[in-house]
Amino acid sequence: MTFRLNPPPGQPDPEDLTLRITGVQARPRPTDDGQPDPSKLEVRLGTTRGEIRALLDVSEGQTGALITCSGAMGGEHETRGPADNVYQRLAEQLPGEGISTLRIHYRIAGEFEECVLDLLGACSFLSGVGAERIVLAGHSFGGAVVIKTAQIMPQVRGVISLSPQLFGTRQVEEMAKPLLLIHGTADAILHHMASEDIYERALEPKKLVLIPDGGHGLAEDPETVMSEMRQFIHQHAAPT
């Protein structure tokens, strides 16, 4: 499948922003005892714009999935997530509850359009292997990436935006999909007013959770973050 990002009205057409998946490689990741586990895969998506790496935890035979992405810095923490490694904790729990997880690494961290293309490619890959109900979750910069991606991808059934930035959310009302926003009231990097602004413009159904005295990484109350995310994911991606 090929994706093209179009500029907002009134802005000049950017240089070609298309992505096409050209191949997929997957190999089992070793478990704690060193043995490969076929339900835990390291995935490499070959594309016309470079390779997208991801960790896939499979719920065999199920059609719901969660895709996660990080902030603008990328790096090793991409697959762990904020709030005491919430992405990793979800990947350990959700497959046993009927929901697969895919945790992606950006090709070019911090480049908004490129990261949206990465997420679109990830959605396309999961749809190609049977996913029908996808929830997206992103933190900080990634909180805007997931909103933009959900505007484009019909298989996305819900969006979780953690401590999001405003840039990239101007058309959130066009997303028209369930939205969960979580933000700390003591975030010194992206003020919680960003989530409040997004919430006001988004269509129903929507929910805003403010973590008292929570910082940008939401480490002050990781269990509330985990609980809110799991409830939302099950509501929109769990087996029917």
Image (cartoon, grey):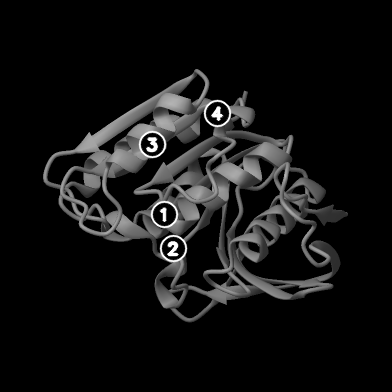
Residue flagged by tag 3: what amino acid is it?
A: Leu
Q: Judge depth for marks 4 and 3 and give the one in front.
A: 3
Residue flagged by tag 2: what amino acid is it?
A: Gly
Q: Earlier in the sequence, mark 4 or mark 1?
A: 1
Q: Label 1: few (<14), some or many (≥20) within 10 Å?
A: many
Give the CA separation, mark 1 to mark 3: 10 Å
Residue contact between numbered discs 3 and 2, judged by CB atoms under 8 Å: no
Q: Tell me which residue sits at (76%, 53%) in the image.
A: 5
Mark number, residue 71: 2
Give the CA separation, mark 4 to mark 3: 15 Å
Residue contact between numbered discs 4 and 2, judged by CB atoms under 8 Å: no
Q: Tell me which residue sits at (59%, 61%) in the image.
A: 112
Which residue position holds label 4? Answer: 236
Q: Which of marks 1 and 2 is nearer the N terminus?
A: 2
Mark number, residue 139: 1
Mark number, residue 101: none
| Rendered view: 177 above or below 40 | above
Confirm whether residue 238 shows in the render.
no
Residue flagged by tag 1: what amino acid is it?
A: His
Where residue 23 appears, x then y in whole percent?
85, 71
Q: Label 2: few (<14), some or many (≥20) within 10 Å?
A: many
Where residue 214 appears, x then y in whole percent?
17, 48
Which residue position holds label 3? Answer: 181
Q: Earlier in the sequence, mark 1 or mark 3?
A: 1
Is 148 left or right of 13, judged from the image as shown?
A: left
- The C terminus: image quadrant: top right
